[in-house]
Amino acid sequence: MKNEKNTLYPFPTIEDRNCAELALTTFLRVQNGASRAIMLLVLKAILKKYHLTKLKLNNCIVETNERDCIVIKPKKFITDKNCPNCNEAIYSTDSKVRIISICEGQRSDFVTYGCQCGEVFGKVEVTSPVT
Ligand SMILES: [Zn+2]
């Protein structure tokens, strides 16, 4: 008999992890509202299925916050202006890099970027110069 108090939830299967990965990379490649909505649904469903608040993917960590929203946190951080994988410029007008989320701070914002090549990375953007 199982001890219900110490229920161990199964680790996400390879299939489910690949599904989460595919939802993310599809969104990064297509970069439209529909693919974003699908990505969020898929990630939420997988987190819920395994009773997780955190799921590590290849290039990022998916978390749910206290309001049950999906937060995508990068594993890599940059200080320059290019995608660390394909070197795409992040600020050019026709850039293949999109902002996934912004966390606003006092003097700087923490921005998570996603590139069409599938890379996810973070950067601290100083909003007001230190005096
Ligand atoms: Zn890239």
Image: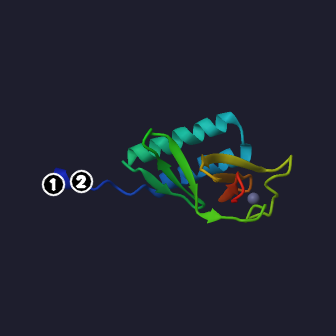
Please give the name of the residue rendered at 60% of the width and 60% of the height, measured from the top-left corner.
59
Point out the image quarter for the N terminus: bottom left
Residue 93: which disc? Answer: none
Circle 2 packing at 10 Å, graded few (<14), some (14-19), many (20+), is few
Which residue extends farthest front?
Answer: 131
- Percent of width and height locating residue 61: 53, 56
The residue that mark 1 highlights is 3
Say what secondary structure mark 1 lies in: loop
**On the image, numbered disc 2 is attached to which residue?**
7
Against 48, is 54 above or below?
below
Question: Outermost residue toward the right?
Answer: 93
* Side (left or right) of 94 relative to 48: right
Residue 111 locus on image (x, y percent): 65, 52
Q: Specify whether 109 is left or right of 30.
A: left
Mark 2 belongs to which amino acid?
Thr
Foreground pick, 70 / 123: 123
Disc 1 marks which amino acid? Asn
Residue at image coords 57%, 58%: 60
Question: Which image quarter is the C terminus in?
Answer: bottom right
- Give neighbour class at mark 1: few <14, some 14-19, many 20+ (Cα, 10 Å): few
Residue 124 visible, this orientation: yes
Q: Is residue 18 left or right of residue 36?
A: left
For the residues bearing labels 1 and 2, Cβ distance under 8 angstroms = yes
Disc 2 CB within 8 Å of nearest ligand 1 atom? no
> Please, is residue 99 above or below residue 117 in the view?
above
Secondary structure state at the residue bearing disc 2:
loop
- Identity of the residue drawn at 39% across and 50% down: 52
